Amino acid sequence: MFTLRQLEIFRAVVRARTTVGAARALNVSQPLVSNMIRQMEARIGFPLFERLGNRLVPTPDADEIHRDSESIFSLYQAFTHRIEARQRSESGHLRVVGTPPLANALIPRALKEFVSKRPAVRVHLDTRRIIGVLESVETRMADIGLGLNPPEREGLSFEVLARAQMVCVFAPGHPLEDKLAVTSQDLAGLPLILYEPSSSLDIAISRDILTPELRSQAIAEVRYSSVACLMAEVGMGVAFVDSLTAYVGDRYRLSARPLYPSQPVPVCLITRKDEPAKRIQANFIAELRHSPTLTAIREFGNDMTDFDG
């Protein structure tokens, strides 16, 4: 019957009581407003306004139409605001899953920066082991995955955001504090806190550091780097953690030294292959690539490359 534009002009005339006032409010010409009202009256077959002096007074029928149009315009305005918010990437849901080292350091900081500029965005953060991260992205339980040293998987895309380094951590006052970097020989005879065999962090130090002899010195085996830090903190032994866990924040009373030769571990962004990212995902990823935490990790990695050289 009526278009939204016709209703918008009609409502403006009801409020302004003149076609001139309505035209000014809508930033259109007065003849356009007058013509639109005449078209509406011709369409429905009865007048919408009565002229009293210089003012247009809505008829009882017009008052009813105006009241009935309120709900339409409320819905339309809400819809328009949502579209505008999406254009600014300021609304929507972002589901992120990460391995514990990243969920404890990198991801919360990145999410804080992201949502501080987008108050209508809601985030969901899940923490899983690396296989769980891959499965969450694969099955669309998460939009974005972040993990250390993930295995390749068909159907998923992997982008190396930075290369963290494995470091050696121990309680303050430990003899290893005298070292600039720790080698396999330095670890001989010391109680070690290791990871479950074949875990991503175990793999990261197995090639050049963990000899069979050193593995026999294990006093404890853990699943998560945070637990390894807590055990090292109480003096139970020497642990190996990624540089994110060791250097981001001061959560643990620990001393840390780099390993020699350096043991890089890639920090990877995991998404579904051949599937375009939603606007909110793309903007988060763009900000994540330039996050201060990743910048610090890259700089630490560059320092270690220079040290190896």
Image (cartoon, rainbow, N blue to C red):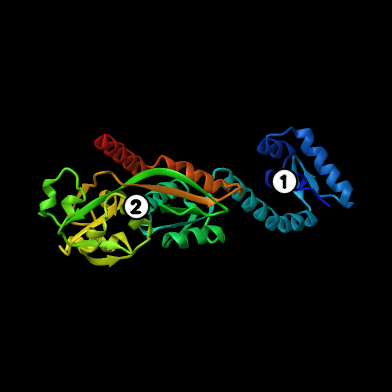
Residue pictured at 27% horizontal, 39% vertical: 304
Crowding around mark 2 (Cα neighbors within 10 Å: few <14, some 14 to 19, many 20+) is many
Disc 2 residue type? Answer: Ala
Residue 174 visible to the viewer: yes
> In the visual, does 224 lie left or right of 68?
left
Kindly state the secondary structure of the residue where label 2 is placed. Answer: helix
> In the visual, does 81 lie left or right of 116?
right
Label 2 vs 1, first from the N-terminus:
1
Kindly state the secondary structure of the residue where label 1 is placed. Answer: helix
x and y percentages locating residue 115 in the rendered image: 44, 50
Q: Nearer the viewer, residue 275 or 160?
A: 160
Image position of 245 with respect to 53: above or below: below
x and y percentages locating residue 241 in the rendered image: 28, 54
Q: How far apart are marks 2 and 1 (CA)?
A: 65 Å
Q: State the residue position of label 1.
A: 8
> In the visual, does 128 lie left or right of 43?
left
Nearer to us of marks 2 and 1 is: 2
Residue pictured at 43% horizontal, 59% vertical: 130
Q: Which quarter shows the C terminus?
A: top left
Tell me the tag on residue 16: none
Image position of 284 with respect to 28: above or below: below
Residue pictured at 26% horizontal, 55% vertical: 211
Residue 254 visible to the viewer: no
Q: Which of 85 and 216 is in front in this view?
A: 216
x and y percentages locating residue 256 in the rendered image: 20, 50
Disc 1 residue type? Answer: Glu
x and y percentages locating residue 201 in the rendered image: 34, 56
Q: State the residue position of label 2.
A: 204
